[in-house]
Image (cartoon, rainbow, N blue to C red):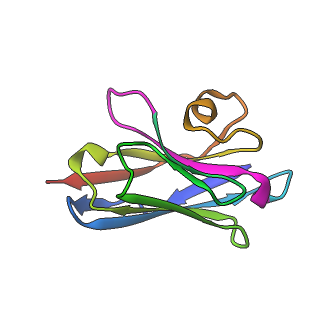
Amino acid sequence: VQLVESGGDSVQAGGSLGLSCAASGFIFSYSNYCMGWFRQAPGKEREGVALIGRDGRPTYADSVKGRFTISRDNAKKTVYLQMDSPEPEDTAMYYCAAHFSLCSLALVSRSADTYWGQGTQVTVSS
């Protein structure tokens, strides 16, 4: 399994940025996987940002609700994260994640069966 993130960049607070994660190598159909985004800032623990289930239902961390939007294109095997009005506190390495059966931020973060990408850096300046 390979998850390849792209789109990380430096952006000013209040701007916008879009991340993408292209997947390949899944045993089962991509549409069956819960896909999501996590992030980790220097010196901090990894935290969940957003997930989107096989039914297209999104889950967001409270810190990004109303500002970030997760979506998926099953035909392209790609999940997206649209970041609107980012804040300096959103600065982190963003990781794409996939899980076949779990779809909660806490459980996906801790599962040994979660697939992870290599990360893409997002830096938000004030």
Q: Is residue 12 left or right of residue 117?
A: left
Q: Would you place residue 4 above or below residue 103 in this image?
A: below
- As for residue 69 lying within the magenta part, the answer is no
Read off the magenta span: 30-46
Left or right of 17 on screen, residue 37 = right
Which residue occupies the extreme left position in the image?
126
Front-most of residues 76 and 2: 76
Q: Is residue 112 left or right of residue 12?
A: right
Coordinates of residue 2 in the picture (x, y in percent)? 69, 51
- Quadrant of the image occupied by residue 40: top left
* In front of the other: 111 or 6: 111
Find residue 114 and report its horizontal and vertical position in percent: 68, 37
Determine the residue positioned at 86% across, 51% down.
27
From the top left corner, tell me how far across and down residue 11 is, in percent: 25, 62
**Residue at position x 67%, y 52% in the image:** 53
Task: Name the residue: 56% across, 37% down.
Answer: 105
Circle count: 0
Vertical relation: 113 (above or below) 56: above
Q: Nearer the viewer, residue 14 or 42?
A: 14
Which residue does the image show at 73% across and 73% down from the upper left? 75
